[in-house]
Image (cartoon, helix red, strand yellow):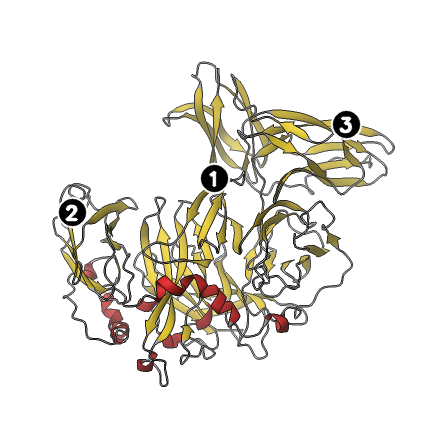
Amino acid sequence: MKFNKRIINLIFLLSLTLSKVFYTQQTSVSEFEYISPVPGSVMNMPETNIIIRYGPAFSTEKIYSEKVIEVKGDKSGLHSGKVILAENNRTFIFVANAPYQNGEVVQVILLNSIKTERGQVVPELTFSFKITDSKINQIGKRYTEKYLLNNFSGTLEENSNSLSSPSKNFQYSVMDDSLPEDFPNIQILSTNNPSEGLIFLTPFDYFNQGENYLVIMDNYGTPVFYRKMHYLNYDFKKQPTGVLTFYDELVSKFFVLDNSYNLIDSLFTKNGYVTDVHELIITENNHSLMMSYDWQQVGMDTVVSGGNPNATVIGLIVQEQDENKNVVFQWRSWDHFKITDATYDVDLTDSIIDYVHGNAIEVDNDGNILISSRNMDEVTKINRQTGDIIWRLGGEYCENNEFTFINDPIGFSHQHDIRRLPNGNITLFDNGNLHNPAFTRIVEYQLDEINKLAFLVWKYSNNPETLSWAMGSARRLPNHNTIIGWGSGTSPAISEVRPNGDIALFLRIPDTLFNYRGFKYPWKTELFTCDPDSLVFGYVPNGDSLTMQLTINNNSDQQIEINSIYNREFCYTMLETLPIIIAPFGAQTISVKFNSSSDDNCFDDLHLRWDTEGQRIAQIVPLIGSGNPNFTSVEDEFSISDYYLSQNFPNPFNPNTSIRYQIPQPGLVSIKVYDILGNDVSTLVNEEKPAGSYNVEFNAVGLSSGIYFYQLQAGTYVTTKKMILMK
């Protein structure tokens, strides 16, 4: 980390304190890869931890047995605390047992008794930082989003009906589908062979703050999962690790659900910062990236003419936690951005100034971080190891843009949801507030990061062009379609568009609601599963029928009640009477009948539902039949698009159990069984497999009763499940 490059920024920050502070001489800082808080920085939180990376891994020889760090506040004195080594011993963390005092200078001395794993002596390090004088963080942070939403340019009344709808030659409405009375009226207005997967959304009534729902629905608008929530929730999505997450505004935390929709964890920013709604990313190694809005009191009369001497200025904090929830990386806008970097529509003489308004984090293909700062019209690339800025990409009114836009003279404005694609391009949701005239579009840029050139390679906007003045998202799907969440634009709420701009799907919510982002993923619950996972009746002559059996497996320790079913086509019927009660880890077999009534194909989905008060959990079983004698294959209609590993059945078992899995592309497949100590007890599969669905049997003869784990590895995809051998 080259701290000498921050001298100008540091002088600016020191001027904000309105007092002269003596800082202990900083020594050896340039020899270290990363230090947090930044040496000489101000406005740090009293609860902040100290993070040091030298480069090579630290030796553990003296770390936990001797005094290796001295931390002293000029008001609070010496601080004891806990030393942690994280990230394969590369990251040294000190967490003080008690907070520092407001306004004090904290001196840190890393003693030179520490060595690296290779025996190199780590230089002695001395630096200091200042704790904030402000108490605003303890007062106002929960109300950040309320203030910001109420002060966006435009109003709900002016913008709620601004987005046009496509021709209404198609419409599905599910309000008569046994849903709660207050469930939002979600409609699919247009569909034209959309991509596979389920739609994730959280429509919310921000201004009235009524009941809200987490929702997963199919391409016909039929809910597969919903859960009634009693406060505002945002950003309901599937993480790369396979879990689901959402933000709960009531407690300012992200909650984590497993594939049975059980609450298994919560994630929130530390070091005294309240978690912001805009982003959570859980990486494949179970690190989490979040952000916080940092309210600080600043004498803006020393920054701009006419500035408020007691202004509240909102900074941005980006925080990374490891798998044990240790803060291993922290980046603050105060150390890298100037308040005057804000675009011209941010009033720097106001009493409250949101000069950054971060709204997205993206892990770049090279492991570094991209952040989107709405009120600076800027996308910034940050070195994840050092915290240094690598480059700054900005729109027309960005003060620090380093790129030349080759074929896009207007750039972007007040953007959301920056994402890096596998091909190296980036997409973003260009809200377009400062375009003239203002309009919203989705853009894809090819970046030449060496010569700082940006090429516009794809764009999409509604016809006619309309404005979504806040929120929004754009995500590229595996089939190269783009799923768009229109944020404050309520009609449409979500669109799926093809590369040529044709609409594949168009979803609408009531004009009184918002939807922060919209997503689409392959997804199915493991709470209960079906064997087989689809029923292929094949060819059945017109006028005949065929009945097939379907086994519903309860993979949980609770009783499940299938008390509702749903399908769209009359050619399929379930013969059993509801409810169907399935004991813990039990199974029930049902019969499904296909009545062939024409020479056409009949594709349908059977929704098996467990509806309880305020919640639905459903499993979808594709139904495939035809009255056409030439019908021979369904591969084109139902291709495998995702990896999948089933819960074994039966479970518990003795001694045989069956495991199903599928792979979307050919490659080396391994399925191994481990005991509770991690010993490899059996290899079920270890060979090259073509894409497809498979079933493998496990015989546990000779093994003791107990808990075992089975793991599927195919390429870079790895997933593990638990099973119980009970003799």
Indicate left or right for 287 with 570 as reference: left
Q: CA distance from mark 2 to mark 3?
A: 72 Å
User: Is there a contact, CB below 8 Å, between mark 2 and mark 1?
Assistant: no
**Circle 1 residue:** 715
Q: What amino acid is labelled 1 in the image?
A: Gly
For residue 556, what is the image quadrant? top right
Q: Which mark is residue 547?
A: 3
Locate residue 367, reporting x and y percent.
39, 54
Q: Is residue 452 visible?
A: no
Q: Earlier in the sequence, mark 1 or mark 3?
A: 3
**Where the N terminus falls, by quadrant?**
bottom left
Residue 305 visible in the picture: yes
Which disc, if any, is residue 115?
Answer: 2
**Horizontally, is 527 left or right of 682 in the view?**
right
Pick whichever of labels 2 and 1 is earlier in the sequence: 2
> Residues at badges 2 and 3 in contact (C-beta under 8 Å)?
no
Query: Which is in the foreground here, disc 1 or disc 3?
Result: 3
Across and down, in percent, residue 590 comes to 70, 27
